[in-house]
Amino acid sequence: MADVQAFRALRYDLGVVGSLESVIAPPYDVIDPQQRAGLAARSAHNVVGIDLPQAPLGGDAYEEAARLLALWRSQGAVVRDETPALWALQQDYVGPNGRALSRRGIFARVRIEEYGAGRIRPHERTHPGPKEDRLRLTRATKANLSPIFSLYDDPAGAAWGALEPHLAGDPWGEATDADGTVNRLWRIDDGGAIARVKIAMGDTELLIADGHHRYETARVYAEEIGGEGDHRYVLMCLVALQDPGLTIFPTHRLLNKVKDPAVQQKLGRYLRETFDVTPIEQSELRPPDGDGPLTMGYIDSFHQQAYRLVLKDQATADAALAQYPEPYRHLDTAVLEALVLEGVLGMTEDDIAHLDGLGYSRTDDEALQAVLSKDYDCAFFLRGSPVRQVQEIAAAGVNMPPKSTFFYPKVPTGLLFNPLG
């Protein structure tokens, strides 16, 4: 079972930094250089300075992150709580599909375990590069700077129900992020409420939704330090699988090694043989979410005509993924990877892991513009995976291809930190 605990958070002192909104940032891996500059200009204490550090004059960026965090603590801008607590997060947002929703999460520290049934499970494969970056940052700062987003099973809503009576007053902090998501955060140190949350989560396993690299980094760091202590725990934001605000959006696939006419002809021939192909408007490229055979939107930079592709026969996917369990053979990203990326275009797992000829986009407009501008040769527009499907595949003991899910909204960095020593 997962070991979920209250913790003595490192956090901003809002009386010193002025506002929570000025110091939070999106997760480091979605920030481009222009966004980073804008975030850093908001406040001298914006978290981007330590979570996506840049050293002046070509020095060590990780040492700069450690120096900044130590400076902020000496200034009183970042302080550590005297007593442990859980923190309740409510995020009010409008998703890419235009629906207004609220999602609720609980910040806690969780004991680091090996992946396994009944404890903590991953749900998708990871790229190698970010792990080394996050490990070096953790070594330097000795803190978890951004949370791992994990899911837990709680049909009765007992965990959130234990905290809800303590949310009647004003939140500790509130911030609206660049996507318009309103983040409200409450601190709960009531021993009875904390005990009820631990009981509610006592028999559940945790499914990592976002932050696999950070979790695997935390595990390596814990083993490096050895022994017992704060380094054996990692910061998580825990959301119930049954939360009505839990939504998953797709990540579209972009390809940029399809310029050769022979490759284009081979791909076009295979798509016509394997899929029912229907011309559509560019505005219809993202297919509606739902079950059934693999359904995608497709457009290339040469003809710029949009198409709907529907897999003719599930047996084609079953044969290509015969070594995998049945739920995985119905996963859109897995079928696309097996039939098209690897099957027709000959990409290797290493190509996919290192983004050699492959790119990703989380928005319909960005993916379309990447093709129309000829930055990429073609794009496959995907459906969102149902939460149930993610559960089934994780329970079967296999990981999804990278970027199979896009849980929205992101949990901002800078709400809370978890000290490791």
Image: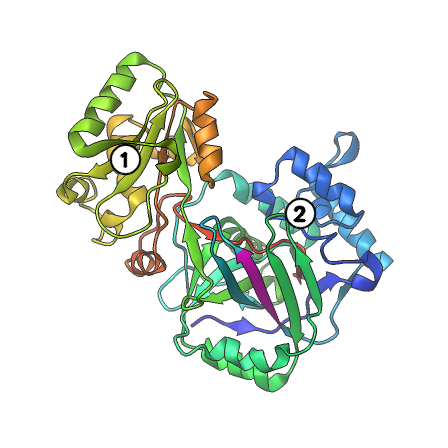
Check disc 1 and report the residue beneath it. Answer: 308
Q: Nearer the viewer, residue 250 or 79?
A: 250
Tag 2 residue: 51
The secondary element bearing badge 1 is classed as strand
Q: Is residue 282 magenta?
A: no
Q: Residue at x 49, y 65 (%)?
A: 239
Horizontal side of 332 relative to 414 (left or right) equals: left
Could you say which disc has been placed on residue 52 in the image?
none
Main SS of the magenta part reads strand
Please tell me which residue is depicted at 37% across the width and 22% down the height of the picture. 304
**Which of the two discs, 1 and 2, sits closer to the camera?**
1
Q: Position of residue 370 (x, y in %)?
A: 47, 27
Measured from the top left, where is residue 25 in percent x and y?
A: 66, 49
Give amino acid for label 2: Asp
Q: Position of residue 287 (x, y in %)?
A: 33, 42
**Quadrant into which the C terminus falls:** bottom right
Please give the range of residues in magenta.
87-93
Look at the image and tell me in which quarter the N terminus lies.
Answer: bottom left
The reply, left or right, for residue 389 in relation to residue 119 is: left
The image quadrant that residue 171 belongs to is: bottom right
Residue at 40 percent across and 76 percent down: it is 203
State the residue in front, 229 or 121: 121
Q: Reply above or below: 238 against 209.
A: below
* Depth order, front residue of 251/210: 251
Q: Is residue 9 above or below residue 26?
A: below
The picture places residue 215, in percent across and down from the top left corner, at 51, 55
Q: Amino acid at mark 1?
A: Arg
